[in-house]
Image (cartoon, rainbow, N blue to C red):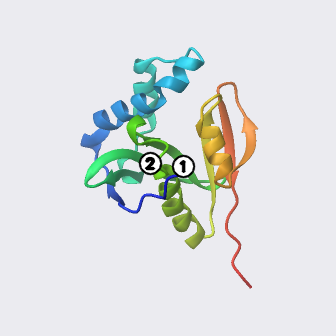
Amino acid sequence: MPAVQQDIAFAPATAQDADALVALRIAAMRDSLERIGRFDPIRARERFMAGFSPDHTQHILQDGQRIGFYVLKPDADAGLLLDHLYIQPGHQGQRVGAAVLAHIFAQADAQALAMRVGALRGSDSNRFYLRHGFALAEQGEFDNYYIRPAAVAAA
């Protein structure tokens, strides 16, 4: 297994990044959506844009180049919602996602907040989230929903 990427950095997104983020999302999800017969780039764009919040979006950078992004929003039920986490296909499987989750978990743990995330049923991301401490909480028609409990402070 490759080592966790040490050269990962994060930078805030802006509203002007929307088109590039949509393109990255479509590229990252295409295989999973095609497998279940639901690939539709127009719908993918509309779904992303309907909830796009630049204030909660971070670029994932490697050597100064955007290789992905994540969206972490406050969530009334769980504390935090990992609304999106996408890595460009050529950078997947290199432990970038694990490094990103470690960064996000540190934020959640510092605030003692639980996290919620959804994943397309049939997507490899389901195994990824289970491997990183999320537990299946609910299944929808097309998505699985996972929870990672809040960190418990040591006594």
Looking at the image, how many numbered discs can be counted on the residues?
Answer: 2
Residue at 63% across, 47% down: 129
On the image, the x and y values in percent for residue 148 come to 67, 55
Q: Secondary structure at mark 2?
A: strand
To which quarter of the image does residue 24 belong?
top left
- Residue most toward the top? 37
**As rendered, which of 74 and 141 lies closer to the eye?**
141
Around disc 1, counting alpha carbons within 10 Å, would you say few (fewer than 14), some (14 to 19), or many (20 or more)? some
Q: Which mark is residue 133?
A: none
Above or below: residue 109 compared with residue 13: below
- Split into 4 quadrants, where in the image is the C terminus? bottom right
Q: Nearer the viewer, residue 115 or 24?
A: 24
Amino acid type, callout 2:
Tyr
- Given residues 51 and 8, the one toward you in this image is 8
Q: Position of residue 103 (x, y in %)?
A: 48, 62
Residue marked by disc 2: 70
Q: Secondary structure at mark 1?
A: strand
The numbered disc on residue 82 is: 1
For the point 67% across and 40% down, the residue is 145
Q: Is residue 97 left or right of residue 113?
A: left
Residue 113: x %, y % from top left: 62, 64
Task: Name, please, the residue furthest toward the front.
Answer: 1
Whether tag 1 and tag 2 are in contact, CB under 8 A, the answer is: yes
Please report whichever mark, 1 or 2, sits nearer to the chain's N-terminal start.
Answer: 2
> Badge 2: few (under 14), some or many (20 or more) residues near its Cα, within 10 Å?
many
Mark 1 → mark 2, Cα distance in angstroms: 7 Å
Residue 139 coordinates in the image, percent (x, y): 73, 33
- Please indicate whether residue 12 sits to the left or right of residue 95 in the image: left
Q: Quadrant of residue 87?
A: top left
> At label 1, which amino acid type do we have?
Leu
